[in-house]
Amino acid sequence: MNGMNDKSKNLYLVGFMGVGKSVIGRRLAGELGMRFVDTDHAIEKAQGCSIAEIFKKEGEARFREYERSFIESGHAATGYVVACGGGLVVQPGMVDLLRARGVVVSLFASVETIIERTARNKKRPLLNVEDREARIRELLNARESVYLEAGPAISTEGRSLADIVDHIIRIYRSHCD
C-alpha cells in the first residue's frame, strides 16, 4: 500500500529543534498520502505573529497553551503528519494526548548537528542566548527522557532522508495494523 486514506492514524514527530521534524514530516506526508502540518507554523498563522513575538508579548506559558489547543482541536483526528515543536511533549499529559490521537515517533541528532542546523535560524526564542551550545545541552538534558519515552526513537544523524522516511513508515505501519 503506497498511500494511506484519510482514515489513517495521525503521525506525530517529536524531538528537539533542528532534528529534522519538518523536512522529514513533509516527505512522510507525501509518501503516505497524508497532509502535513508543523505546529509552530500553524500557531504563527493562527496568532498572526511569530513564535518569538508570542514568547516576547505573551510568554512561554501562553505559547504552550496554544500548542495544547492545537493538538486537542487544531487539526483533524486522522490523516495528518504533524511536526511538533521541540517543547510540546514536555508539557504534562501531552505524550498521552499524542498517543491517543496517533503514532508518535521521536527524532534525535547530536548536539553538534543541532547547533549546526539551528545556527542560522534566529527565530528560535529559546536559543536567543549568548551561549547557544550550553543552552542546547541544558534543554536536551531536561527533555531527552521525555523524548525517549514518547515513542520509538530514530536518529537523523548521518542518514539519508529516504532512509529515515522508510524507517519511520515501517514503524508507522506496524502501529496501524
Image (tube, rainbow, N blue to C red):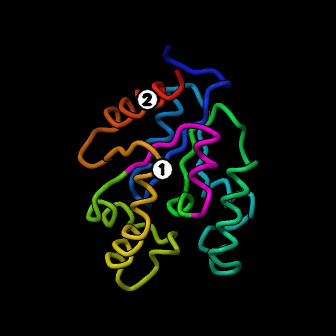
Q: What percent of the width, then of the height, locates residue 60? A: 62, 75
Q: What percent of the width, then of the height, locates residue 55? A: 63, 76
Does 109 sit left or right of 8 as displayed?
A: left
Residue at image location 60% in from the left, 46% down from the top: 98
Q: Mark 2: give few (<14), some (14-19) or many (20+) Cα within 10 Å.
A: some
| Secondary-structure class at tag 2 | helix
Position of 152 relative to 50 (above/below) = above
Q: Which residue is mark 2?
A: 169
- Mark 2 or mark 1: which comes first in sequence? 1
Residue 105 is marked as none
Q: Is residue 160 magenta?
A: no
Nearer to us of marks 2 and 1 is 1
Q: Nearer the viewer, residue 96 or 74?
A: 96
| Secondary-structure class at tag 1 | helix
Does 126 sit left or right of 98 as displayed?
A: left
Number of numbered tags placed on the structure image: 2
- Residue at the far bottom in the pictured view: 130
Residue at image location 44% in from the left, 52% down from the top: 149
Region rendered in magenta: 91-107
Q: CA distance from mark 2 to mark 1?
A: 17 Å
The disc labelled 1 sits on which kind of residue?
Ala
Q: What percent of the width, then of the height, locates residue 119? A: 36, 68
- Residue at the far top in the pictured view: 1
Q: Mark 1: give few (<14), some (14-19) or many (20+) Cα within 10 Å.
A: many
Residue at image location 48% in from the left, 25% down from the top: 173
Q: Is residue 92 magenta?
A: yes
Position of 169 relative to 119 (above/below) = above
Q: Which residue is mark 1?
A: 150
Position of 125 relative to 68 (above/below) = below
The disc labelled 2 sits on which kind of residue?
Ile
Position of 126 relative to 27 (above/below) = below
